[in-house]
Image: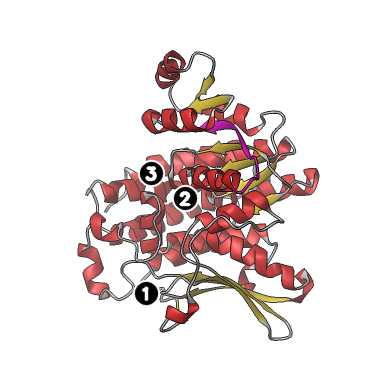
Amino acid sequence: MQGRRIVILGSTGSIGSQTLDVIERLNRAGRAFTVVGLAAGRNIDLLSTQIERFSPLVVSVAEEEDAIALRGRFNDLAVLSGSEGLEELAKYPDVDLVVNALVGAIGLSPTLTTLSSGHTLALANKESMVIGGELVTRLLQEKKGTILPIDSEHNAIFQSLHAGKHSEIERIIITASGGPFLNTPIDELAHVKAADALHHPNWSMGSRITIDSATMVNKAFEVIEAHYLFNVPYEKITPIVHPQSVIHSLVEYQDGSIIAELAASDMRIPIQYALVYPDRVATNLPRLSLEKMSRISFEPLDVMRYPAFASVLTAGVRGGSATAAINAADEVLVKKFLRGEIGFTKIAEGLQQILDRWEERDDVEDKDLSLARILDVDRWAREQVADLSL
């Protein structure tokens, strides 16, 4: 496999930008990758730079006014906008791989469209599996599609699963750094600021995922995602705190063997693995120096320190639209925290309140879960957050 034709949804975000960096590296290594399409939000200046560097055939932006501005800058470029633009890019013809690097619930519909169109999906939008795992699983069974996970943990699991049969899995072990507040006294967490929470000890990521890492919401999302991606029951998925972020996840087999994937804490490594799978290519990405490591440690995940983890995982086990409710609430609560409107610990309190309210709904049972149902609950939860006592 020398090259692929690629669409990137969320090209101006952290994962999207790093994906383009990887593509440049692969092309310098002689792989001849082609960027067919890019989708972004409102960072038009960065998108314009990406257009100049990669010459896509089509782009899409969130707002039509930005699309008009781009058409003025690039006369021969097809420029789309809104959710319709995302859908068009997700099913764009003659494409080998769609990278979904969108953040939030907005990523679910393009994920479903990509798989329905027969394209291989490189998935970094964990919300697709968190709120729509049942829909995605159903679609994969019908269409026999392919998902290549980009998240470092799921990418590590994906690689480790090559060592044995699915029936031989004893458990999946998902590692967590513990975030910036791993050693902060619990009674001080109510007073931490957004700037403190955004200072992740190991990874450079977008603002929402960084806050979610601090609350451990992100890890609960990853457990839910692993449940659907790898068809493993929740009781066989174990989160564990590994502060060094060297081992990105592990798979334990029934004979007692534990297979792990280790690498430098650089998202471009799992991104590249997804782009060139099943190949491996040398592109001068950072290497892990085992000789310089003084220790590798593990400890149990403390739910007293991370109460949000328990609430989100409860929603995952409950299934149906519960995850849509709690994900939407988290998106809003994180924004409130970043704006200084609520304290850090109020995120976890708000999530539990939303889950309680979801349980009290008259239509709580999701006998025939659909995209429309998920989006309806998503809207409901966002409205409910404004009414919470925080």
**What amino acid is at disc 1?**
Met
Residue 152 on the magenta segment: no
Tally of numbered discs? 3
Q: Is residue 192 above or below residue 79?
A: below
Give the structural element (helix, strand or loop) at label 2. Answer: helix
Say whether disc 1 or disc 2 marks the residue closer to the N-terminus. Answer: 1
Name the N-terminal-most of marks 2 and 3.
2
Q: Position of residue 176 (x, y in %)?
A: 46, 69
Magenta residues, as a range?
29-40
Nearest the eye: 365 or 349: 349
Viewer can see residue 317: no
Question: What is the x, y in percent for residue 197?
Answer: 29, 60
**Which mark lies nearer to you, 1 or 3?**
1
Q: Which residue is mark 3?
A: 384
Residue annotated with mark 1:
304
Question: Against 324, is 289 above or below?
Answer: below
In this view of the protein, can residue 358 be seen by the observer? Answer: yes
* Mark 1, secondary structure of its residue: loop
Percent x, y for residue 103? Answer: 47, 44
Q: CA distance from mark 2 to mark 3?
A: 13 Å
Give the residue number, with chain letter if any, for mark 2: 327
Quarter of the rendering containing residue 257? bottom right
Tell me if mark 1 has few (under 14), some (14-19) or many (20+) residues whose alpha carbon lies within 10 angstroms of its own: few
